[in-house]
Amino acid sequence: MDLDLWMLNFLTSKGLELEMAHYVLLGIGSIFLLLVCLLGNFVTKKFIVQGIRKLIKNSKNDWDDILLEKKVFHSLSALVPLIFIQYLSVPILSHFSFLIPFVHIVVKVSLVLVIASVMVKTLKTLDDVSTRVPYFKDKPIGSYVQIANIMIYVVAAILIFAAILNRDPFALLGALGALTAVLMLVFKDTILGLVASIQLSSHDMVRVGDWVSMPKYGADGDVLEITLNTVKIQNWDKTISTIPTYAFISGSFKNWRGMTDSRGRRIKRSLNINMTSIRFCTDEEIAHYKSVELLKDYIESIQSEIATHNDTNRHDKSSLLNGRNLTNIGLFREYAHQYLLANENLRTDLTLMVRQLEPTENGLPIEVYCFSNNIEWVEYEGIQADIFDHLLSSISNFDLEIFQNPTGKFGS
């Protein structure tokens, strides 16, 4: 005899009306189903999940430990009660068949939510694992994870509505096509961020850890995080700037990665010389400058070259305006150049020069252009300061004067 029929006969034999007996059976069945679900969930977590946990703890891999941290297997255990409800609800609700479709809809919705939760947690695990892999550490994996999460949520929402409305998900998806324009307007920032993230990654424009400067947004510092919609930058004053990802495509910014990769940081600064102090050097001064170790070889070489030129062209040297002559500004430029070459804090394999720029109302700029071999900010500033401390102190030895306002001597 069928158990349900036997219990029904038993209850009616005890004086219960048939309708009341159905409700009692429903209560007993519901309690039984609840106990089965609790027992199934307990067994799954106690034995299966714990068994998996022990295997993972004994594993040498790191990624499976993150799966435990994100409780992926814990979420999967929720599938067991749903399976029991799906199959046991039919006999339990045999006398209340109108409730079966509702229960099955709840199970389908719950099933979609559980699977979506597991997939999102798995993607989060993938994101965390990527930060531990050197090759992917500076890649915007988080942006792609966010894109995948959005797709999961959209698909889950479609499946839930399809289950509630008892419609084919593909038919529902086709109906949503009419809302494409509205969806594009609502998710405009997300779509722009998606396009920008793909371009930033494919063209390797920005990586996590890069030093970038965006004056428009007042940002100057290291990139902390690249997401679908924003890029976080920690400025040098330790503040955090959050900039739309699309701004890196639509606007301009400076990435200092090339400097970091070359291990050389550029020094580009000028000294403004008072042009009234520039003149030819006398023989006595030239003889004096020969005692400067950095100029001795240069002066001997250039003097021989100048003498050959003047003799060949028979210039009248009774006037310094005839032929070629050494100047105090020329000797200072060469001295500065030799000083840079001898400086152990500079990269001689990269561009290194001392050059004249176009004269201005503030004098004649003599620019130092070179690269330090230390790119750290504090050390770099120290190297740069030492160079100009020395050059500023040396310039008076060449009878040159620095132009500066507002003194009458140099500003007139």
Image: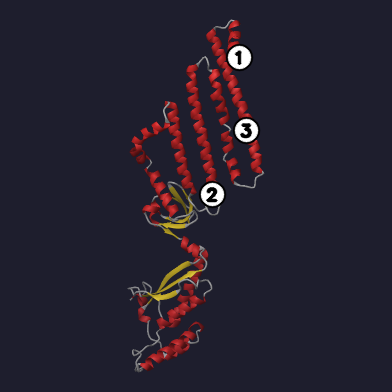
Amino acid type, label 2? Ser
Image quadrant holding the N terminus, namely top right
At label 3, counting other C-alpha atoms closer than 10 Å, the crowd grade (few under 14, some 14-19, many 20 or more) is: some
Say which residue label 2 marks.
130
> Measured along the vertical axis of the image, is residue 48 above or below residue 315?
above
Looking at the rendered image, the disc whose residue lies closer to the viewer, 3 or 1, is: 1
Quarter holding residue 180: top left
Give the distance between the C-alpha atoms of the residues marked 2 and 3, in whole angstroms: 28 Å
Give the structural element (helix, strand or loop) at label 2. helix
In the visual, does 325 lie left or right of 138?
A: left
The answer to which of 80 and 265 lies nearer the viewer is 80
At label 1, counting other C-alpha atoms closer than 10 Å, the crowd grade (few under 14, some 14-19, many 20 or more) is: few
Give the distance between the C-alpha atoms of the residues marked 3 and 1, in whole angstroms: 31 Å
Mark drawn on residue 3: 1
> Could you tell me residue 355's position as x and y percent?
40, 75
What is the basis of the colouring in this image?
secondary structure
Image quadrant holding the C terminus, namely bottom left
Check if mark 1's residue and mark 2's residue have beta carbons within 8 Å. no
Amino acid type, label 3? Lys
> Measured along the vertical axis of the image, is residue 125 above or below residue 11?
below
The answer to which of 112 and 224 lies nearer the viewer is 112
Say which residue label 3 marks.
45
